[in-house]
């Protein structure tokens, strides 16, 4: 288990931030399957019910980390993209509940775009796990 971020009141070094963030992303990925090719609205709903709480929890943990000042703007950009992913996935689940194909497609596109933004920002920070595309298991 990693020590709580911010304990002792100081900011993490770049290396420690990368290590902590990638550990959080690893734990999230271990608990969630990617939604590769959903075959039904119900598949989206099942995936969302499992994934959204874990994603929100991981995002809270990532947001609690205290990166070094030099990384702060890039971290904020990265986490803003992740929040866009979360909103788009919530919209995706809501559209699937309504059986609204156009809204499902729109939300999926927004989630993919925000995911690309997030990966680019994570890679710019040197994050390995957080900067990878989730693949089917």
Image: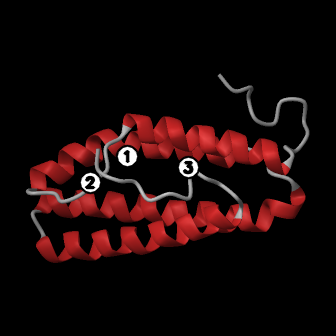
Between disc 3 and disc 2, whose residue precedes?
Answer: 2
Residue drawn at point x = 19 percent, y = 49 percent = 45
Q: Foreground residue, 7 or 121? A: 121
Between disc 3 and disc 1, whose residue precedes?
Answer: 1
- Which x, y percent locates residue 129? 56, 49
Q: Which mark is residue 35?
A: 2
Q: Foreground residue, 120 or 106? A: 120
Cα–Cα gap, marks 3 and 1? 19 Å
- Residue to which mark 1 is pinned: 52
Quarter assignment of residue 124: bottom right
- Which x, y percent locates residue 90? 34, 57
Query: Mark 1 or mark 2, which is nearer to you?
Result: 2
- Residue to which mark 3 is pinned: 129
User: Within 10 Å of the Cα at label 2, are there few (<14), some (14-19), or many (20+) other Cα atoms?
Assistant: some
Q: Quadrant of the C terminus?
A: top left
Residue drawn at point x = 50 percent, y = 57 percent = 132
- Which x, y percent locates residue 89? 34, 59
Cα–Cα gap, marks 1 and 2? 12 Å
Q: Count the marks: how many?
A: 3
Q: Foreground residue, 95 or 42? A: 42
């Amino acid at each position: 288990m990693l020590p709580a971020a911010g304990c002792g009141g100081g900011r993490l070094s770049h290396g420690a931030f990368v290590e902590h963030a990638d550990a959080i992303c690893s734990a999230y990925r271990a608990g969630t399957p990617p939604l590769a090719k959903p075959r039904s609205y119900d598949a989206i709903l099942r995936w969302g019910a499992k994934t959204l709480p874990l994603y929100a929890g991981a995002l809270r943990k990532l947001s609690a980390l205290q990166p070094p000042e030099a990384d702060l703007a890039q971290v904020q950009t990265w986490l803003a993209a992740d929040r866009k992913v979360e909103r788009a996935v919530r919209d995706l689940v809501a559209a699937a509940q309504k059986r609204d194909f156009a809204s499902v497609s729109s939300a999926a596109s927004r989630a993919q775009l925000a995911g690309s933004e997030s990966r680019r920002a994570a890679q710019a920070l040197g994050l390995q796990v957080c900067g990878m595309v989730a693949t089917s298991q």
